[in-house]
Image (spheres, helix red, strand yellow):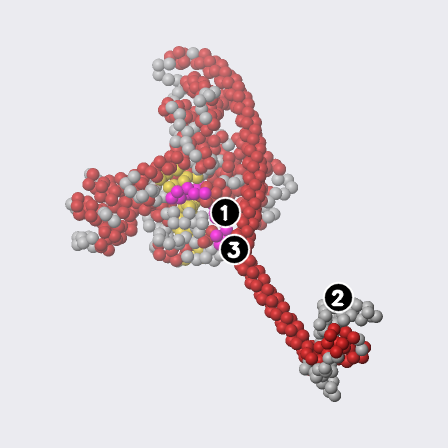
């Protein structure tokens, strides 16, 4: 099945889907727009990060300064650049209205002002221009992946724009995680994953790679080569091309005046030229009267420092005309390589890309709006997707062209030829002339099939090369099957007299060979199905192993996270305890000093209280003694105290002696002692320690001669 037949089948499926959803106005309108777009020029979306050089590269591709370029982020609205017989600007609003902006000529200033509108005010701009570079393709400039417009409207709006395109040219200075995630999100649907043939990654601003020196382009090429062999990137992108967009734009739009200025600068002396090229500031401010600084500044803005240096080098190396310099600069900038890749990858395969867009639209509708009775459409969709060998051929061709898959030189050329680079006919795929006979075709097909069957069992090939071999082998089998189904009459050739004389014998041989080829085709088909089943089994095992590995890694990550949390909690607890201990240690001297101060103050208070108590007791004692000695005496007889009154009332002998002593001590008038008492005073009573003589009739009794008389004992 050719790409034209594939497109017709995809278009028929899209039409039946439109009929199935005819009662849904929104879905049917959307599908009708996709159906009409299949007859329009190929749409290529130019996307990338902010300030990745999208507008500059668009100008370089179409050969006209149409897209506005500024130092700041400008593109807020999705802009379509398409061919038209006369200049025209159409403004589409989010509500579906279309407004025609009358213009006589297209200039970047007008487009720049329109691109500043908010995305909720303008959904898209359509710029029609009679530029020859837009006759075969329509370029769609999208806002930057991380721009304010995308953050405001959401990434789904940008993905919707990319889904309306047939191919994607993605620009980046250096692939980052954001770029990879975005490209993967664009290829989320089943159709996009099965048919990854519509993406080219361009390393824009390759002259700024590394330190931006003379080896910048070589470094960019090495980076591109590394990403060509990356399995993640190669799953959704086929080509990685370094390009200098500014130099390409300047070369494609170079004028005779630009060439004359560059030629004059190249004729300067080596010293003056090297001094002029030391820096951009030196190039503008250098004292060169023949070329004013304004002209040099404009030249620097158009070509860049790298472009001017390369131009002067080419002019001194032999470039003698503007056309020759232009071609050399286009080759140096990488724009020629990019244009050739766009033409071979997209323009020449636009039927396959349109078929992909049609099936992608059907896939989106069936997933977003399922309803009863849709199973028949799903079955037809799966059949078309499974039997579309043309997409596998395109993917393998992209891998061969980009260097992701490489065979030996003879096999490399034969693989490309079998995949249809020289044409879709059996003669072109087998490398034979149009006048070749069926026998020659059968012999060539048999030999080709044998060679690629040997490659299919080559144990030294990796997975990508084995898949490429299976695709080439199936293409060879389809050539044989086509010959069996359409044998055609044998062509008489000069020098083949045996065929001219015995055509029936040649026909019989052709029929026998056709039967053999049919048997070989059946065997090959069985082998292919067995290989596909084995591949599906291995893929399922790999998927299960991957899921188990992911689960194991997730469990390990969870355990590690829990252990880390426990470790951090333990560290926090220990740190808190250490901090508390440190604070307690720092507070211990203060506490001890406070306790010592409290103890000192308490001791002082206690001593003061005891001293106060002693003082009060002494005062009370003195007061009490004074009460007995002075104030307690009777007013009529001051010499009589309560003690003397007590002793006199009891008339005790000892008391009488004590009264005499007390009277003497208290200042009372002492009477003259009796003779008996005087004689007895000389002797001491041993029991009392006094000179009083004990009374034999009374028990021993002692009275303390104190004023109170309270310390008596018997």
Q: Write the residue at 59% across / 35% down.
A: 379
The mark that comes first in sequence, 2 or 1, is 1
Crowding around mark 1 (Cα neighbors within 10 Å: few <14, some 14 to 19, many 20+) is few
- What span is in magenta? 151-177
User: What residue is drawn where x is 45% and y is 43%?
Assistant: 177
Could you say which quadrant of the image residue 267 lies in? top left
Q: Is residue 523 above or below residue 464?
A: above
Which is more N-terminal, label 1 or label 3? 1
Q: Nearer the viewer, mark 2 or mark 1?
A: 2
- Label 3 crowd bin: few (<14), some (14–19), many (20+), radius 10 Å: few
Picture layout, residue 607 above or below residue 497: below
Query: For the C terminus, which image quadrant?
Result: bottom right
Residue 598: x and y in percent read: 58, 63
Residue for point 33% across, 44% down = 208
User: Alpha carbon of mark 3 to alpha carbon of mark 2: how far?
Assistant: 72 Å
Q: Is residue 56 left or right of residue 465?
A: left
The label number, if any, that marks residue 206 in the structure image: none
Using the image, determine if residue 101 lies above or below residue 302.
below
For the view shown, which residue lies furthest in the right direction?
697
Q: Which residue is label 3 attached to? A: 586
Picture residue at 49% right of the left edge, 53% below the top: 153
Name the residue tied to disc 1.
160
Cα–Cα gap, marks 2 and 1:
135 Å
- The secondary structure type at the circle numbered 3 is helix
Question: Which residue was labeled with disc 2?
Answer: 687
Q: Earlier in the sequence, mark 3 or mark 2?
A: 3
666 vs 355, nearest the viewer: 666
Q: Is residue 694 visible?
A: yes
Of badges 3 and 2, the one in the foreground is: 2
């Amino acid at each position: 099945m050719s790409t034209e037949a594939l497109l017709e089948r995809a278009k028929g499926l899209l039409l039946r889907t439109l009929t199935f959803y005819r009662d849904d106005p929104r879905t049917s309108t959307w599908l009708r727009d996709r159906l009409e777009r299949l007859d329009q020029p190929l749409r290529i979306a130019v996307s990338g990060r902010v300030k990745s050089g999208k507008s500059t590269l668009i100008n370089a591709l179409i050969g006209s300064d149409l897209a506005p370029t500024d130092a700041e982020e400008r593109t807020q609205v999705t802009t379509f650049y398409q061919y038209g017989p006369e200049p025209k600007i159409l403004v589409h609003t989010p509500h579906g209205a279309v407004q025609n902006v009358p213009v006589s000529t297209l200039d970047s200033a007008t487009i720049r002002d329109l691109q500043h509108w908010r995305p909720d005010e303008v959904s898209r701009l359509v710029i029609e221009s009679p530029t020859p570079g837009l006759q075969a393709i329509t370029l769609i400039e999208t806002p930057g992946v991380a721009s304010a417009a995308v953050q405001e409207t959401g990434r789904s709006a940008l993905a919707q724009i990319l889904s309306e395109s047939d191919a994607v040219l993605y620009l980046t200075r250096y692939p980052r995680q954001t770029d990879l995630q975005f490209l993967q999100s664009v290829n989320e649907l089943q159709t996009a994953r099965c048919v990854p043939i519509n993406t080219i990654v361009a390393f824009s601003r390759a002259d700024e790679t590394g330190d931006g020196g003379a080896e910048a382009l070589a470094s960019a090429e090495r980076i591109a080569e590394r990403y060509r062999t990356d399995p993640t990137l190669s799953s959704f992108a086929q080509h990685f091309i370094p390009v200098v967009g500014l130099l390409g734009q300047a070369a494609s739009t170079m004028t005779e005046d630009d060439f004359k200025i560059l030629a004059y600068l190249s004729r300067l002396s080596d010293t003056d030229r090297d001094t002029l090229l030391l820096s951009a500031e030196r190039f503008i401010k250098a004292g060169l009267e023949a070329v004013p600084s304004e002209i040099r500044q404009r030249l620097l803005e158009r070509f860049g420092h790298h472009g001017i240096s390369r131009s002067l080098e080419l002019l001194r190396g032999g470039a003698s005309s503007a056309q020759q310099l232009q071609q050399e600069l286009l080759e140096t900038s990488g724009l020629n390589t990019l244009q050739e890749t766009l033409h071979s990858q997209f323009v020449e395969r636009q039927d396959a890309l349109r078929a992909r867009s049609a099936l992608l639209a059907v896939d989106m509708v069936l997933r977003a709006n399922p309803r009863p009775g849709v199973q028949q459409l799903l079955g037809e969709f799966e059949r078309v997707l499974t039997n579309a060998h043309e997409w596998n051929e395109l993917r393998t061709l992209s891998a061969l062209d980009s260097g992701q898959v490489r065979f030996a030189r003879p096999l490399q050329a034969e693989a490309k030829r079998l995949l249809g680079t020289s044409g879709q006919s059996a003669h072109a795929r087998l490398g034979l002339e149009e006048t070749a006979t069926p026998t020659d075709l059968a012999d060539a097909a048999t030999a080709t099939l044998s060679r690629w069957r040997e490659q299919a069992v080559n144990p030294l090939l990796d997975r990508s090369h084995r898949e490429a071999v299976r695709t080439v082998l199936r293409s060879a089998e389809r050539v044989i099957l086509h010959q069996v189904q359409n044998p055609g009459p044998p062509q008489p050739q000069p020098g083949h007299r045996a065929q001219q004389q015995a055509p029936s014998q040649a026909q019989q041989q052709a029929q026998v060979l056709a039967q053999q080829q049919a048997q070989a085709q059946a065997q090959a088909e069985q082998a292919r199905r067995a290989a596909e089943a084995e591949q599906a089994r291995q893929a399922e095992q790999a998927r299960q192993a991957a899921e188990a590995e992911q689960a194991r890694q997730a469990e390990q990550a969870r355990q590690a996270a829990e252990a880390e949390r426990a470790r951090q909690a333990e560290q926090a607890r220990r740190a808190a305890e250490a901090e508390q201990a440190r604070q307690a240690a720092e507070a211990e001297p203060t506490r001890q000093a406070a306790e010592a101060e409290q103890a000192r103050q308490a001791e002082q208070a206690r001593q003061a209280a005891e001293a106060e108590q002693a003082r009060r007791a002494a005062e009370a004692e003195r007061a009490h003694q004074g009460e007995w000695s002075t104030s307690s005496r009777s007013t009529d007889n001051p010499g009589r105290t309560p003690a003397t009154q007590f002793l006199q009332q009891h008339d005790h002998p000892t008391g009488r002696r004590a009264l005499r002593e007390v009277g003497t001590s208290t200042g009372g008038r002492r009477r003259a002692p009796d003779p008996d008492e005087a004689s007895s005073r000389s002797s001491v009573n041993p029991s009392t320690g006094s000179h009083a003589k004990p009374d034999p009739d009374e028990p021993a009794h002692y009275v303390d001669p104190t004023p109170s008389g309270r310390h008596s004992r018997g």
